[in-house]
Image (spheres, rainbow, N blue to C red):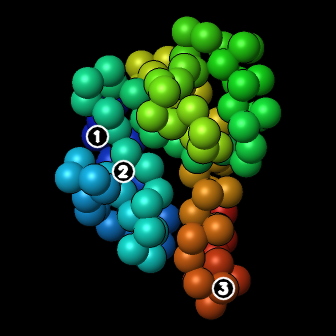
Amino acid sequence: MTPSELHALALSFPETAEGTSHGMPSFKASGKFFVRLRPEDDSLVVYVDSLDHRDLLMEAEPETFHIIDHYRGYPIVLARLATVDPVWLRKTLEARWLTLVPKRVSKTYVPL
């Protein structure tokens, strides 16, 4: 996946826009943190459903998934842009997006 493909994917969800998070470029859904690219290691900061899920991803695909101490206590995984599966990323972002947008938006959403 390329940065421009990430850009298109993130903005394909309604109510999503470019923004900043802790001074870094990111994408927000309804004004809340959605996903961002870490330029220092070309990894995406992606919320997952639990710490256990994150740990399983890192164990199963260490070439794609990793973590740094800053995110260790959160249900976040870092996914290398070059090797992340686009289908996995879309599904994971969709799940995150559904938790961020108002019900009036999520009720009318039709998955691609």
Badge 2 element: helix
Which amino acid is tagged 1?
Ser
86 horizontally vs 10: left or right: right
Mark with earlier residue (1, 3): 1
Which labelled disc corresponds to residue 4? 1
- Residue found at x 64% / y 68%: 99
Which amino acid is tagged 3?
Lys
Coordinates of residue 23 in the picture (x, y in percent): 20, 52
Which labelled disc corresponds to residue 103? 3
Q: Nearer the viewer, residue 87 or 68?
A: 68
Badge 3 element: helix
Which amino acid is tagged 2?
Ala
Is 29 above or below relative to 39? below
- Residue found at x 33% / y 67%: 17
Question: What residue did someone put label 2 on?
Answer: 8
62 horizontally vs 3: left or right: right
Cβ atoms at labels 3 and 2 below 8 Å apart: no
Circle 3 residues within 10 Å: few <14, some 14–19, many ≥20: few
Is 74 above or below relative to 44? below
Mark with earlier residue (3, 2): 2
- Residue found at x 49% / y 65%: 13
Question: Which residue is situated farthest in the top direction here?
Answer: 63
- Residue found at x 64% / y 43%: 75
Coordinates of residue 29 in the picture (x, y in percent): 45, 68
